[in-house]
Image (spheres, rainbow, N blue to C red):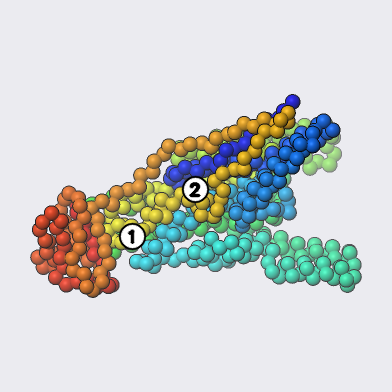
Amino acid sequence: MAITLQVPSSFACPNDDIFSLPTREDLVNAINDIAKIPGELKAEAVKLGDELSVEAQEEIDKIVEDIEKFMDKIADILSPYWKKGQTRNWQKEAKDAITEFIQEFHIYVPTKVAELISKIIPVSLKLSLFGLTIDCLRLFDPAYQKELQDQISGITKEHLAELEKIKEDLKKDVITQEEFEKKLKELNEKKSKIVDKFFAFIPEKIRGFNAEFGVKCDEWKAKMTWQYIKTKIQEFLTNGLHAVFGKLIDKFDEIWDALGLPSLISLFTVDIPTLIDNAIKSFKEKRDKLVEDLKDPELEQKARDKILEEIDGVNKQITDALNEFSIFGFDIAKIIGGKVDETVTSIEDKIVEIKIAFEDFKQNWQKKLMFDWVKLVKKFFSAIGLGSIFKPIFFTLCDLLKLIGFPPSIPKIGAIAGLTSIVQTEPKVNTYVPDRGDDSGINFKNGDSETTTFDIPVASGDTKVFKDGVELEIGTDYTVSGGLNPKVIFSTAPLLTESVSILKI
């Protein structure tokens, strides 16, 4: 009997706003669907044994080879996000890689906006955090990111050099196996202390993988620390942009007042980890008591099994409570990017994932509201020579995927007669059309010390002329020519260091 293989036809990639497709769910599940095909084919081949024809085996080998090459390509493209951990969990690796990549996207956009604004008003793009100095402009360099992550994980050059030395000493019989194991333990303990030092900077109510729910893993703690740091980078960039927008309004207040635009939005603070902890508090207290009861050395096996069963039940209650949690009208599935198909996941992983996802979401929501406001006041930014910031603002996740060479198509997989049938799954289609704002009636130019005549934008309303943000007087500073295409004519050409803003409002 033939097995049915679910094969995605392509990755979802329509344009949208900050909550755009492709979501984490779209990407991770599509990758997982492809990656599990070789295992399914090999298992079926083993089951058929001698009944499998030579031709069918050749077709299986070809499909497996194509998919393995494709997966290697995906892993290479998603480096440094994709890491083959010492504690292997392939689905977690794929999920973490996509999660980090999407975090990167949400850092990339405001960094590019801040970089453009810094040409007019200084914007700090260096952040001191957890004893690290982070240069946001270098975050998209894989080598720089690895350098930061190595500091957090304790896998520094010094650590690797010490490890290599004791391995070499063992090989040359300079030390015994017992001495080697002792030195290796000391080295790993030193590494764990580095991990714990950075991990301690994370607010206690957000931390995970510290044995609270039975999982203690330095590797995952370091990864969580890096993911949390990325939420703080987003917060730093959002707060920095919010402050600099206020400075731009103050600097060009006459243009702002002339356009009659809405006030700069206020940022908000929400203690999301506390909200999450409150949602699972009673279940966690019940679970803690059960875990304590389990430590009784005189407990009979039957009673022990019953407690373990009760713990599983409480774990499910915790997961259910988290799945029902929502904020700003978005449920948890939407916030963490959809449901990822996983065969195994720990409750620790689930809670950490949700807490980090909410921290991400809070910063992304702040940024969405701020950028929605920016689109409302697009005329202002265009009038002061910052129309270029709309290119990164409208840069989508799909644009970033194309930029790093992510393949839009998936290898064609044909059916194998008598062995497999293929069902192609189509990516979700998004019909959302983003509002790209309005900058009509605006003409901005930099002076060149020679040009005196400038175009008036085609629009209805009165003409207002500004030099370096200061409104000029008609008849004194400039005149307006007549005819079908009237022009603004300056009495003195604006200098190279001066800007001209002509508004029709």
Q: Nearer the viewer, residue 275 or 438?
A: 438
Q: Which residue is mark 2?
A: 398
Please, is residue 247 above or below residue 14 in the view? below
Which residue lies under the disc numbered 1? 386
Q: Is residue 355 left or right of residue 90?
A: left
Residue under the image location 71 percent in, 30 percent down: 417
Q: In the rendered view, does 232 fall on the left or right side of 165? A: left
The amino acid at mark 2 is: Cys
Q: Residue at x 73, y 64 (%)?
A: 190
Q: Position of residue 360 (x, y in %)?
A: 52, 49
Q: Quadrant of the N terminus?
A: top right
Type of amino acid under label 1: Leu
Tell me where residue 381 appears, x and y as whole percent: 31, 57
Residue 424: image location, x then y, percent? 59, 33
Q: Is residue 88 left or right of residue 496?
A: right
Q: Residues at badges 2 and 1 in contact (C-beta under 8 Å)?
A: no
The location of residue 468, given as percent across then percent down, is: 25, 67
Query: Which badge, 2 or 1, is on the more N-terminal residue?
Result: 1
> Which quadrant holds residue 32?
top right
